[in-house]
Image (tube, rainbow, N blue to C red):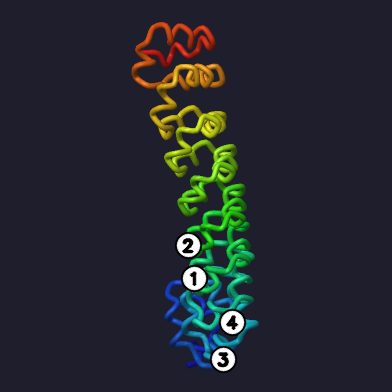
Amino acid sequence: DALRGDADVVLAAVRLDGAALAHATEKLREDRGFALAAVKANVSALAHISKNLRMNQEFIEAIVCARPHALGHVEDIWRASRRVVMAALESCGFALQFADPRLRDDKEVVLAAVRRSADALAFASEEIRGDRDVVLAAVKASPSALEHATKPLKEDKEVVLAAVSQCGFALKYVADSLRAEHEVVLTAVRTSASILEYADKSVRESRDFMLALVEMNASALAYAGKSLREDKAFVLQAVGARGEALKCAE
């Protein structure tokens, strides 16, 4: 019993196996300071601390602040607690995945999550993933968050431009109708010509538009439609505008 009540010995065991805490003395499992250290060392130890501590909101808030993913190991009552969930989100937005469904459908809660970790939008309810304010906040922080938006927002030009203006590769998450939109594609290409592989075929076969893109980025020629790349007159215009485009000619 002496060693099972020794904080150093038990903590060494818990680092390897959180369940080892179950074999510690009751006194140690009820010790707030030790329990906090144990959970920080191994979040699975949370299941083996005393029930009094597991049901203590102040202690649970301290735990999820230190280890946000511990939210997935707490009692259901805490995953449904707005205050506890918000405490976890202050450190990591991805903790949203462990929140009660009602909180994942709460605009304020989801906004707190995406401001910390934009791709946490994936864990929001469908209704919130269709909320324009939330999605705009997410894509402005991380354009890849557009992947998790609902279809209507992937068709929303303002939302799409907010994403592709920061990272052209967000174009792959855009609705087909906007992949044929010249302003959207032009904005995306400013960050990388290679995103043209996600553009609509009609864009890549548009002579005037592709010439405009080559003038801006010589590498765009490599993504022009096959008929344009085999068109001598078009290629002459392209290399005349940007000599380095020659490396992308057939």
Q: Residue 141 appears at what percent x and percent y?
A: 61, 49
Residue 126: which numbered mark, if any?
2
The residue that mark 1 highlights is: 98
First-in-chain label (4 vs 1): 4
Mark 2–mark 4 Cα distance, whole angstroms, equals 40 Å
SS at mark 1? helix
Assess whether mark 1 and mark 4 are in contact (beta carbons under 8 angstroms). Answer: no
Q: Is residue 44 left or right of residue 186?
A: left
Please report the residue visible at 37 percent of the width from the left and 21 percent of the height from the top: 225
Q: Is residue 169 above or below residue 90?
A: above
Q: Where is residue 105 shown, x and y percent of the image?
A: 53, 68
The residue closer to the viewer here, 17 or 169, is: 169
Indicate the position of residue 203 as horizontal and vertical percent values: 44, 27
Identify the residue under disc 4. 34
45 on left or right of 113: left
Q: Choose the circle earlier in sequence order: 4 or 3.
A: 4
Discs 2, 1 touching: Cβ within 8 Å: no
Query: Between disc 2 and disc 4, whose residue precedes?
Result: 4
- In whole angstroms, how far apart are the C-alphas of marks 4 and 1? 25 Å
